[in-house]
Amino acid sequence: MTDAVSLAGIQKSFGSVRALTGASLEVQPGEIHALVGENGAGKSTLMKVLGGLIKPDDGRVTVNGRDVTGWSTSEAIAAGIGIVHQHFMLVPTLTVAENLVLGCEPKSRGGVLDHRRAAEDVRKLSAGTGLSIEPERLISDLSVGEAQRVEILKVLFRGARILVLDEPTAVLSPPEVRELWAVLRRLRDQGDTIILITHRLDEVVDLSDTITVMRAGKTVARIKTAETTPAEIARMMVGREVSLSAGKRIEPLDEPVTANPDQGLVVRNLGVVGSRGIRVVDDVSFTVKPGEILGIAGV
């Protein structure tokens, strides 16, 4: 079977920074393929190469068996590549329908935008994908989850059959995540190909068919999801064993924490275990004095 997407030996540097050092990706038609790695591993850069946003220094890109290395963004869109970015690219003062048809507007006999036809086209696409949204609503009035539906509809409206979603659940609530997963599975079952960039390993295991792991600009593994575990994926991402469970026991607080306005806020040895059983805060201490602004930095 010809791969829907194949990137081989991709090299890309920005000045002295080597972002990609021989990265590769093979995605079969009609699958949900997870692309995982730590921040800075090169995931988004590799997808920008696929989408024509940047040109590789070396390597080969093929889509449906055709060599498209170095192509432009417009050529990628015309070939059915649709990238849904983590930060939405919608015009807030326009309606859903106006955003979807922007650049390819259906015109009336007078040469102006045919609003009725645009709304009908959006309703038809919305019904066929399960991404329900009213065409006449303003983008500025939408929730985050609704805005993301519009972003996905926008690339589908332009004929995308290969969708790239960059951290799509970063700002979604749990019900919105479940709704998105149902939509992506429906699109896959209809024959679309989906590349999912994420660092949430539980989502990777629940949703994807195949996983590609990147580390420090390189591809280090390609595995079937059914043949691995979150712990193994994490080990490949960082290059060492990683504990996904809490270590030492964290005793719950017997009393609520109160702040003294005269003393400020004092935190000592704070530990938090998240809903997935992973320690998300471990032995953190800090002090904030009255009237002080505390900056917190990290990687």
Image (spheres, rainbow, N blue to C red):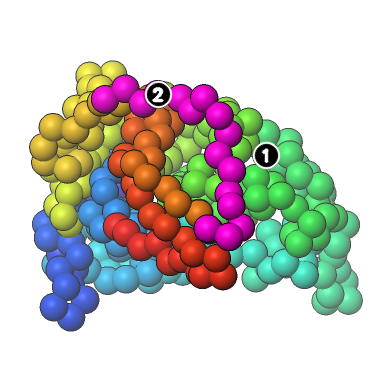
Toward the viewer: 82 or 299? 299
Q: State the SS at label 2.
A: loop
How far apart are labels 2 and 1 at the CA level? 43 Å
Q: State the SS at label 1.
A: loop
Q: Is residue 71 left or right of residue 88?
A: left
Residue at 49%, 46% in the rendered image: 170
Residue at 36%, 62% in the rendered image: 297
**Residue 106 x %, y %:** 76, 64
> Label 2: few (<14), some or many (≥20) within 10 Å?
few
Q: Is residue 162 left or right of residue 25?
A: right
**Residue 57 x %, y %:** 17, 71
Query: Would you say residue 151 is visible in this rendering?
Result: yes
Amino acid under disc 2: Glu
- The quadrant of the image that shows the N terminus is top left
Q: Which mark is residue 251?
A: 2
**Which residue position is annotated with label 1?**
131
- Of badges 2 and 1, the one in the foreground is 2
Count all numbered tags in the image, as a single digit.
2
**Residue 5 x %, y %:** 30, 47
Residue at 65%, 50% in the rendered image: 144
- Up-down: is 209 above or below 292? above
- The quadrant of the image that shows the C terminus is bottom left
Q: What stretch is highlighted in magenta?
A: 248-263
